[in-house]
Structure formats: C-alpha cells, structure tokens
Image (cartoon, rainbow, N blue to C red):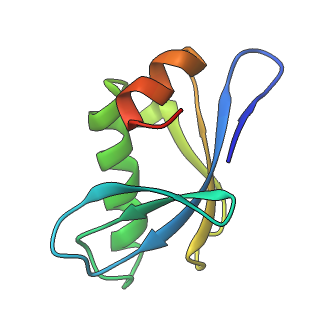
C-alpha cells in the first residue's frame, strides 16, 4: 500500500471508486488504499480530482502528487514528494 522510495518520495497504491457522493479516504482494501472520488471517470476528470484531493488532504502542492501508473484503471499508483511517511499516514488516517 505504501512504499518509501530512494530520495524520500512516497508511493501509494490506490483503488479508486469514481462517481462517489463525496471525495474521501475509505481505508485499506486488498493491499491498496481505497479512495472515493466524486468526479466521473471521463476525460481524466477523476484523475484530476484525485490529485487535487490528495494534495489538499496532505497539505502539499499538486506538483508534489504525481500519477505514475493506472491512468485508465481503478488501480493507480501515485508518488508524493515533500512529505514524511508518518505525516502522510496521519493525514490519511491509516497506520
């Protein structure tokens, strides 16, 4: 679910549920972190909303959150820079 990369970046394995009533972290799900996103999966809207949601939730810039895998899949991998792993876990409510 969470990996620390050389250089300090953190990689998150996510399962995305688009078209949710609101954007929120649902919690662990089959080795990934499940996140519900309010936007539909059309023309990259859900991906944009995911990056914005994570940046706001974690208190980092959108540039610090990069989608590296799963652009057209519900299973995604994002890399986050500029944040300690313990802070990330605390802000996402996971342990």
Q: Position of residue 50 (x, y in %)?
A: 38, 57
Q: Position of residue 69 (x, y in %)?
A: 69, 61
Q: Residue at x 55, y 76 (%)?
A: 74
Which image quarter: residue 31?
bottom right
Q: Nearer the viewer, residue 45 or 19?
A: 19
Residue furthest right in the image: 6
Residue furthest left in the image: 21
Q: Position of residue 44 (x, y in %)?
A: 42, 73
Which image quarter: residue 37?
bottom left
Kindly tell me whether residue 82 is visible in this rendering.
no
In the picture, measured across the screen, residue 52 lies left or right of residue 11, that is left
Q: Residue at x 35, y 36 (%)?
A: 55
Q: Nearer the viewer, residue 14 or 50?
A: 14
Q: Position of residue 17 (x, y in %)?
A: 41, 75
Q: Residue at x 30, y 82 (%)?
A: 40
As displayed, is residue 79 above or below residue 25? above
């Amino acid at each position: 679910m969470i990996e620390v990369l050389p250089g300090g970046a953190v990689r998150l394995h996510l399962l995305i549920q688009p078209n949710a009533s609101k954007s929120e972290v649902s919690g662990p799900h089959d080795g990934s972190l499940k996140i519900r996103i309010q936007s539909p999966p059309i023309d990259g809207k859900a991906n944009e909303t995911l990056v914005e949601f994570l940046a706001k939730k974690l208190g980092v810039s959108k540039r610090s959150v990069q989608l590296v895998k799963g652009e057209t899949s519900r299973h995604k991998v994002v890399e986050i820079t500029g944040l300690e792993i313990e802070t990330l876990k605390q802000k996402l409510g996971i342990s």
